[in-house]
Amino acid sequence: MKQLLTEREGAVPASVRSDLEHIFRSAYPRVVGVAARVLGSRDEAEDVAQEAFLAFGRSSVPAGEAVGWLCVAAAHTALNHLRSGRRRASREEAATDGGHSTAPDVADAVVTLDERRRVRAALSRLPRRQAIALVLRHSGLSYAEVAAALELSPGSVGTTVRRAESALRKELGHASPE
């Protein structure tokens, strides 16, 4: 972990928490998974996870709340990348336009890329709390973990996720090509 911090920051600040390495080792796969669900790219998700862990390393969040906090931070950061990173869509289009092959597997890949891009764009238009609740829940966090991470009552997580799913379907319906 110190190597990651050293590479990114130039040196490990004295204010980094002593429990960071343990939390990093236990939570990293889950945090990357949350970011990857939003971004669709493991490489970008690892960058987002690193940002989340750097912020956590400087925080005073209790260790017991670390996983939820880190997952929310990863979802926020990933959504920010989506909202400000419309360049990804143009790169994906350029990549699919580059090969003019009509083989069925290429067509399937283009459809899949387009569908994923549509879902990510629709997700980025949802209210932030709904988008994060949806991403966290579909990333495998329990209702209790989502509730703790978003400071909701566990009973309201299901309602928030259902509303988010409904809003996402509505966004996808509005964004469907004609």
Image: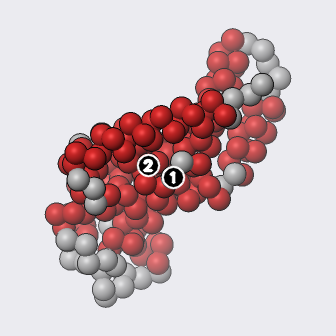
Q: In which quadrant is the N terminus drawn?
A: bottom left
Q: Is residue 74 visible?
A: yes
Image position of 85 (left or right of 97): left
Q: Is residue 43 visible?
A: no
The picture quadrant where one finds residue 6 is bottom left
The picture quadrant where one finds residue 53 is bottom left
Q: In which quadrant is the C terminus drawn?
A: top right
Q: Is residue 40 above or below residue 176?
A: below
Residue that numbered label 1 is attached to: 127
The count of marks equals 2
Q: Position of residue 64 (x, y in %)?
A: 16, 63
Q: Is residue 100 above or below residue 118?
A: above
**Rendered residue at 57%/34% (across/down):** 170
Instruction: Check contact, mark 2 vs mark 1: CB within 8 A.
Output: yes
* Numbered mark located on residue 130 in the image: 2
**Rendered residue at 44%/48% (across/down):** 130
Amino acid under label 2?
Gln
Residue neighbourhood size for the residue with mark 1, other residues' Cα within 10 Å, grouped as few (<14), some (14–19), many (≥20):
few
Q: Position of residue 135 (x, y in %)?
A: 41, 44
* Distance from Cα at disc 2 to Cα at disc 1: 5 Å
**Rendered residue at 45%/41% (across/down):** 164
Q: Position of residue 153 (x, y in %)?
A: 23, 53
Mark 2 element type: helix
* Identity of the residue furthest to the left in this view: 64
Mark 1 element type: loop
Amino acid under label 1?
Pro
* Identity of the residue furthest to the top in this view: 104
